[in-house]
Amino acid sequence: MGYGKRSIFVTLIVMVFMAKLGTLGRSGFIRKTNDSMRLIMTTFVGFLIGFLIGISFPSVNITKLHFPSSIASYNEDKNSGIKTQALLNHAWISTHNNNSLLNSTSTTKIYVSTNPKGAERLPPEIIVPESDFYLRRLWGNPSEDLLATISLFNWFFPHVALQFPPWFPFPVAGSSPLWLPVPVPLVAGSVSCAGPSVPSLAVGPMAALPSSFVALWLLLLDNLLAFCLPISDWDLSFEQKYLVTFTVGYEQKKNIDAAVKKFSGNFTLLLFHYDGRTSEWDEFEWSKRAIHVSARKQTKWWYAKRFLHPNIVAPYEYIFIWDEDLGLEHFNAERYIELVKKHDLEISQPGLEPNNGLTWQMTKRRGDREVHKETEERPGWCTDPHLPPCAAFVEIMAPVFSRNAWKCVWHMIQNDLVHGWGLDFALRKCVEPAHEKIGVVDSQWIVHQVVPSLGNQGQSEKGKAPWEGVRERCRKEWGIFQTRLADAEKAYYKKMGIAPPNATSV
């Protein structure tokens, strides 16, 4: 109860008491005027004394008085024997304790300004700012949801990727082919929990491999260890190191099935479905371990902005954001990662087969090298040899981002510009020096099959085919994005009071 209400309450009590005294002191011999004056004075003095007494009492909040169950049930049990004095004593003690608690709470409130926005009132140790796409069980211990990858083969021979299927001769660098006559079902036992792909194992430099005999026994021992696990544990996930996403329609299922098998168990697979058909993909065993997100008639950049926040994909070293119409016959994902790390590429893409769907010379595969970072374009296309499209440039059909690069790129993606046109020219803003950190991996190349499946999801307007409306929207978005980026840079330089550089366009 606040000071004002408490004072009025006590004042009223004192006034009644004083009025009672005045009544007892009056007699019939005193004149009426004296009675009235005495009543007025009594009222005034009572009000003054009540106010002074009221403000001297501690604050009492009736709603916060906690009574024991015996007192709370007094009305139900009239024979409980609880005395009024005991009730008042308990009320006073409870009030005193509550005041102490309130004063203590006010000095121990948590507020950490360095916490994420909106979470300042939480203790830092409880905050989990990042997440992942690892699948979790509905039962068991949370700490046991993810299996650690333990392989004797990997322990002895880390780094070089080997692809199965059965009875396949594995090429050995600087040596003769290594034959591992191990049936795939057996080998699959050791890596079946690792992800939605054809089994693959990371083994070490082949120069260090003593013999195919040793390698064979290590693989067999790995499989024996795997089969010793309880069957229920085969449903556990591994903590994959990389993420690959495809934006797909069901009509491209065969192509996606072939593409997925080029990615090892080190990859989490995420499918974005623009046609709303998800359950049909369960005909593929790998689909049951993939992540499926469905929203009709949306592009991969719409999905990426909404589902690939940097805090969600933070566990992954590299993020592949690929189209569905890519031929991966000559591509090995593990080998690709090795080359990206070797050449220190933050943003990259595989080289494109020159005869199919080629737009820019920069992305054209070169057969005489592992990686290239610059090229020559048509006359007048490049004002600077270190700028797009002659360098610091990859296309948006099959980009691969490092974790750090994606943190920047994600923030540059516009919510309303869903096709991503113009983004490829602006990727250089996110790495430094861009002409060294962005490149094309030639020795792991792909084919752009140019299947306009998403384009056909458009709407026919003014007699135009659906794909024509989609293409027109793409061009509009490119212009809008160029304008926004240029205006944003101008605004920044103006605010900082510095002259903008000559090349600020997308």
Image (cartoon, helix red, strand yellow):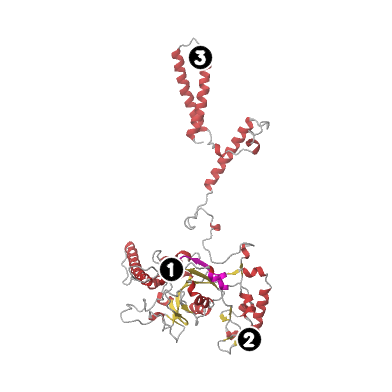
Q: Earlier in the sequence, mark 3 or mark 2?
A: 3
Q: Which residue is mark 3?
A: 26
Pick whichever of labels 2 and 1 is earlier in the sequence: 2
The answer, for residue 447, to whether it is visible in the render is yes
User: What amino acid does circle 2 point to?
Assistant: Ser
Q: CA distance from mark 3 to mark 2?
A: 121 Å
Q: Name the outermost residue toward the top.
A: 29
* x and y percentages locating residue 452 in the rendered image: 42, 75
Question: Where is residue 200 drawn, in percent x and y?
Answer: 58, 78
Q: Nearer the viewer, mark 3 or mark 2?
A: 2
Q: Residue at x 55, y 45 (%)?
A: 104
Q: Which residue is mark 2?
A: 212
Q: Residue at x 45, y 13 (%)?
A: 32
Q: Nearer the viewer, residue 46 or 84?
A: 84
Structural distance between the alpha carbons of marks 1 and 3: 93 Å
Query: Label 3's element?
Result: loop
Q: Which mark is residue 301?
A: 1
Between residue 259 and residue 115, name the one nearer to us.
259
Q: Which amino acid type is shown beneath numbered disc 1? A: Trp
Amino acid under disc 3: Arg
Relative to 413, residue 59 above or below: above
Residue extent of the magenta highlight: 280-300
Cα distance, mark 2 to mark 1? 46 Å
